[in-house]
């Protein structure tokens, strides 16, 4: 591919300008980070797997009317996406107690929650993505009340769909993070799903054993990170039972 301008680089992905106005190329890295970047490593093939898993889930969500930024996969590590104005709020949807909510509220890990709980974090690495309320979001203008209602409604629909999808392949969807953006087309603006959905930003447990099949294997030094991501991809039918194929993928645009 030709050289393109780098627009943004995060902990797990790089965004490049796209081939057409209003598009970007999203490149998935093999970098693994935790604790706001304090812990770092490289997991060979992680970017390839996340690219394929996120593609699969975004396409499935589009089929039920959840508009998102995915256009098409370009190669093993890159996908073409719509350019959006990211809303600086991370949406956390929790079905089972795990992670920070256990520490904050003294709940035992694995406790089923009475209903899906939505939490919001201000998207800021410098501030360690602090928990915020709806009042903060609207008062500081990160999103207006109508946009926030739309985000909450879409998040619950995504959760309902993914709960069923993962349950069907023997996986418990414990919690996950979503990001949304404003997509402009002519004079029209709509809030659409952005970023990615993968074992990097979902907690996924085997339904029979509660074995962790997500980034917690890296956070907690459990080992087998790549194997866990491959297992998720296998159950989703993305890679064959015999093996994942070429995990190195093709060259990135530079």
Image (spheres, rainbow, N blue to C red):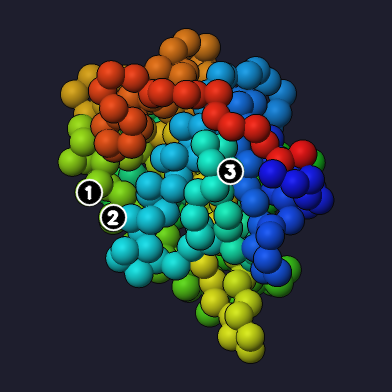
Query: Does residue 182 appear to the left or right of 8 in the view shown?
Result: left
Residue on which the image places disc 2: 161
In this rendering, which labeled residue sits more in front, label 2 or label 3? 3
Mark 1 or 3 closer to N-term?
Answer: 3
Circle 2 sits in a helix, a strand or a loop, which is it? helix
Q: Residues within 10 Å of mark 3 (few under 14, many from 20)?
A: many
Instruction: Work out which quarter of the rendered image holds the C terminus and state it.
Output: top right
Residue on which the image places disc 1: 164
The picture places residue 253, in percent across and down from the top left corner, at 71, 41
Q: Residue at x 28, y 55 (%)?
A: 161
Instruction: Work out which quarter of the rendered image holds the N terminus and state it.
Output: top right
- Nearer the observer, 63 or 210: 63
Q: Can residue 109 be seen at all in this image of the molecule?
A: yes
The relative height of residue 72 versus residue 108 in the rendered view (above or below) is below
Q: Residue at x 39, y 23 (%)?
A: 244
Q: Residue at x 54, y 71 (%)?
A: 191
Q: Are marks 2 and 1 in contact (CB under 8 Å)?
A: yes
- Where residue 219 sits, quadrant-wise, is top right
Residue on which the image places disc 3: 78
Q: Residues within 10 Å of mark 1 (few under 14, many from 20)?
A: few
Query: Does residue 120 appear to the left or right of 150 in the view shown?
Result: right
Q: How many discs mark residues in the rendered view?
A: 3
């Amino acid at each position: 591919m030709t050289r393109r301008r780098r627009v943004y680089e995060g902990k797990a992905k790089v965004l490049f300008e796209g081939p057409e106005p209003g598009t970007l190329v999203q490149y998935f890295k093999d970098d693994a980070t935790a604790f706001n970047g304090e812990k770092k490593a490289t997991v060979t093939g992680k970017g390839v797997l996340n690219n394929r898993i996120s593609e699969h889930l975004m396409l499935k969500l589009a089929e039920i009317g959840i508009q998102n930024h995915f256009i098409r996969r370009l190669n093993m590590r890159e996908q073409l996406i719509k350019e959006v104005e990211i809303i600086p709020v991370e949406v956390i949807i929790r079905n089972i107690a795990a992670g920070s909510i256990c520490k904050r509220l003294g709940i035992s890990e694995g406790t089923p929650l009475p209903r899906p709980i939505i939490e919001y974090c201000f998207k800021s690495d410098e501030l360690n993505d602090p928990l915020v309320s709806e009042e903060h979001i609207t008062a500081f203008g990160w999103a207006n009340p109508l946009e926030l209602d739309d985000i909450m409604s879409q998040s619950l629909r995504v959760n309902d769909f993914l709960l069923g999808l993962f349950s069907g392949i023997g996986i418990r969807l414990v919690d996950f993070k979503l990001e949304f953006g404003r997509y402009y087309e002519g004079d029209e603006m709509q809030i659409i799903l952005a970023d990615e959905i993968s074992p990097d930003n979902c907690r996924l447990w085997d339904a029979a054993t509660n074995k962790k099949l997500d980034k917690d294997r890296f956070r907690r030094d459990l080992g087998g990170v790549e194997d866990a991501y491959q297992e998720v991809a296998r159950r989703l039918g993305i890679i064959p039972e015999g093996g994942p194929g070429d995990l190195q993928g093709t060259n990135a645009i530079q």
